[in-house]
Amino acid sequence: MSQRFFINRFRNWRKGLLVHRVKDFVAFCLFGLSLLPLPLWAQWKVPLNPTEWKVVRTERFLIHYQKGSYLTAVEAARIAQSEAPRIESLLRHRLHHRIKIFLYPSDQDFQSNSILPGIPSESTGGFTDFARHRVVLPFNGNYQDLRHVLVHEIVHAYQFDIADDTNPGIFPLWLMEGMCEYFSLGWDAQTDARIRDLMIHGRMPGLWELHTGQANPYMNYKGGQAIMEFIAQRWGPQRIGFFYKELISLRDLELAFESAFGMSAASFDLEWKKYLAQKYAVVLEENKKADPRFSDQTFRYVDGLGFQLRPVFSPDGKYFAYLSYDGIFPALFLQRVGQPGMDESKRNERMVLLRQLRSSDFEQWYPLTNRISFGPQNTLIVATRSSGKPGIAQVSIKDGDMVRFIPLPFDMVHFPVFVPPSDDETEESILFTGVVQGVSDLYRLDWQSGHLSRLTRDGFYESDPMDMDGCVYFVSDAPATASSAPGTYAPSAQRNRNLFRKCGDGAATKITDLQGDVSRPAPGKECSLYFLSNHEGVRNVYRLPDACRRSRPASARDLDRITASSTEVLSLDSGRQKSDSPGIQPIGDPSLLLSRLEEGALEVRMVEPEDGQLNTERSASVPTFLPSNYSLDPLLPNGAMSVESYTADYDPLLRLSRPPILFITGASDSEGNTSVAGAAYFALADDSGFHDLEGLITYQDRPSNLNVDLRYGYSRWRTKFYTGLYSSRGTFALFSFLDFSLNQLLYNPYFRLIDQQSTGAYAAFYYPLHKFGAVSATYEVAREEKIFAQPEPEQRDREDVFQNRQSFTLQYTFDNTVNSVYGPLDGQALRLSYSVPIRPSGTERNVFVTGAEYRFYHLFDDYSLFAFRLLGARVSGGDAENYPLSVGGYYTIRGYDFLEFEGRNAFVVNLEYRFTFIQQLIFGVPVRWSPGLVRGSIFLDAGAAFDDYKRFQAFDGDVGVTRDLNVSFGVGLHWSNFLWFLFPGALMKIEWATPYDGKRSLPLSQWQGRFSVGFSF
């Protein structure tokens, strides 16, 4: 076998087919560009806080922060300035410009940022853009998380600067992400736990699987980090940067391996696997028997999930709830607790309460900081976001509907837990962590009155609160007590997380002192407390027997070791044993419900007491990493940060936001006639994305036409404002930035124009009501001139147009669809629009336009999907005859000529089944390239355009065929377009279709085939 067994040259950008019809191609490009501004498949960004940027200027960084986030920005500056010299030493590269950091005060504001066109997922901790090297991230109240993510993204900025003009997107993710993880964390407990689990179960992917994308994407981070650890241990950490630079200069991964390590990629892979085998040999040789107390409640090979997060017992102990995925969609599940001898149908009984959280009631599911608890009257309590407001929701177990939502005045709400009334008749309440302006504290919410009380007031990060016997227990990174004032410590300094107890109004007492990370406290019998800790190397369950009485922090010797799992336990809940006698407290230990890491999956396991007692383990699992041996470099003191200004003003200078496009082409015929056409597109924006300017200029000769379209956009909190100018001349100047909507597509039969000229201006805005719904309004004033050719016999006569027009359009859009680069996957969308003419002189165009569109998508378990669309439009007014709606051809009723049918009323119905036709297609000529996944489709279209609905007859009942209704069916192939990085979601499509009258269709050889580029409905 050749040693060049899997890694060759860089992937090349996919190349498009040669296009010979110049003018058609330019028109094609204009059509694609016109679809950019407000595609139906985008969800809306709803920021929580108005954005006013201030800047901390240091020697190497510009930290942009918002009102109330000054202390967070100063700490971010301390982190960045402290870590930059170390990164520069490792990479042997110094930046010659300042890195711009944008720090958002909440995850909601981060997801609503105007820097990234799309919406970051909830699992995105931050990003760094290729073009400007801007670092963008939210702050969740945890300064140690801030340090990790900020340094990770700063390393990306250095990577991109080293790459210079080379697109970093062509480098393997395991290298890019693994380098960032290693330079920010080194070798840490979380990474060791993930790699340890995979090694124990024989599931660790090799370099081949990582490089070819056959491993879990998360392994690009942790698997890549393991590769960087191997390089650092074998050759030193600076060899990582050398390898990266060699890859850039040699532009061949195999040669880079040879140059940096003196071995091929295949040999490197073998050496890395040997290193891991030696590192974890002690664990593999241990061969611990499985703990018989662990009973399986979920199993990935049966239920197909493999990701069960935050499981909790129901009050009666018969059910448990957890967060997971239903297919590809986040979901909240309720499942019966399995018992020995239980019928399999009951054991596997599982109900989805919430799926995807795609309504305006459930806009977010917070997988990393949420906590589920059972509330009153068969309900669940979860943190979510409703109509743009963070808060706590009460969800019915019966149907998943929201019973109650309490909005809270915080940037983020973490770890809510319902506290039932106790014997002293205290009221129902909810404990949670609230984050506001970068400060996290514990709060109690009275469930009946809604009264909010603050339990802690400090600069530390508190989490996992719980109530036991009137005292609040929680986890904090405070060094001694949780009452230190903000500003008296370095927030992001490395510290352990331990348990604290707070009773009444007194100060909190630290009750554990462990070298590691404590989490998930759960009540036990009498005065005991169960929790998770990794102080012995592997996160397991421990018990603190005297939690309510302890006045001094407990050490490891004071704890009971309940489990000694070889892989990490990541979540814990306890269910109290029920007493047979009313009013008598149970005397036995509780059952424990936990999530455990197994083969990279999170499985729910239950540990039950034997004879009322939970037995302890005498020895811990053999450690491969001890938190006590882990350390990060200390940070600079405030006085050594080289800060030039703490409150500098933000500079809204416009710069290129994406590479400009210049396209020039020409053609000639056998008689010597030539034609030249070209298009130029540019986009400018300021660093924050508040201001943007786009321009499109096209030119064609014979006849000579120059078309210009300029649009300026401005974002202010929730609202996006647009204004623009356009001037177009010629039959191929189809659309402007103003109106790419389906209505315009319907009534622009450009192929019948001899000439046209339009000049106008517009102003528009859109305002999101919530994440899935928005209203928009547009005012336009223009001069329009159109000269039409003589109609064909079957076409209506069109009068030439020489007219001014003014119009006002109002539109409402609802869209909760889940999308991919191959189009919508699941959900529904609705668009309603109404346009009225404005006629100050009485001579302007008199046309009213009403439009409606509804779409529905359902994703099946095999990732095929059903798609449905219903749209209708109507034009009225004195000039409506000159502006008929047109349907037919691709995108509407396939199998007919493009825009074949005209009328003042129009409707279209589409039904389509989409499926994976080719999983992967790779070409070797002229270079190695792939269009990616190729999807197939089977569709049925129907629709019509007509003037008088009273005379419209869909079917001729006498002969059983269609009359005015036009029906077609066909098949198609869809794949990602070669400009996917400019038009995300736009596809290349080839579709074949035939008209159908209810009885007859064309022979297959006569089906109409069409190639197109555009968005799937």
Image (cartoon, rainbow, N blue to C red):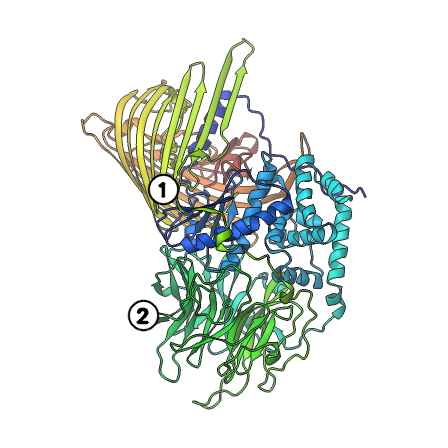
Is residue 217 in view?
no
Element carrying mark 2: loop
Which one is earlier in the sequence, the residue at label 2 or at label 1? 2
Amino acid type at image mark 1: Ser
Q: Position of residue 779 (x, y in %)?
A: 28, 35
Which quadrant holds residue 187?
Answer: bottom right
User: What residue appears at the point 53 percent right and 49 percent down from the top-left corner?
Assistant: 81
Inter-mark Cα distance, 2 to 1: 36 Å
Is residue 349 in view?
yes
For this orientation, the residue located farthest to the left is: 841
Taking depth in this image into account, of 717 and 890 the one nearest to the observer is 717
Which quadrant holds residue 483?
Answer: bottom left
Amino acid type at image mark 2: His
Q: Position of residue 1006 (x, y in %)?
A: 54, 30
Query: Would residue 571 appear left or right of 398 to someone viewing this image?
Result: right
For this orientation, the residue located farthest to the top is: 671
The residue carrying mark 1 is 715
Taking depth in this image into account, of 372 and 633 the one nearest to the observer is 633
Query: Would residue 887 appear left or right of 939 to someone viewing this image?
Result: left
The residue carrying mark 2 is 451
Q: Position of residue 11 (x, y in %)?
A: 64, 37
Element carrying mark 1: strand
Q: Position of residue 894 (x, y in %)?
A: 47, 35
Q: Residues within 10 Å of mark 2 (few under 14, many from 20)?
A: few
Relative height, residue 300 to residue 228 (above, below): below
Relative height, residue 980 to residue 295 (above, below): above
Query: Would residue 874 appear left or right of 307 to someone viewing this image?
Result: left
Q: Residues within 10 Å of mark 1 (few under 14, many from 20)?
A: some
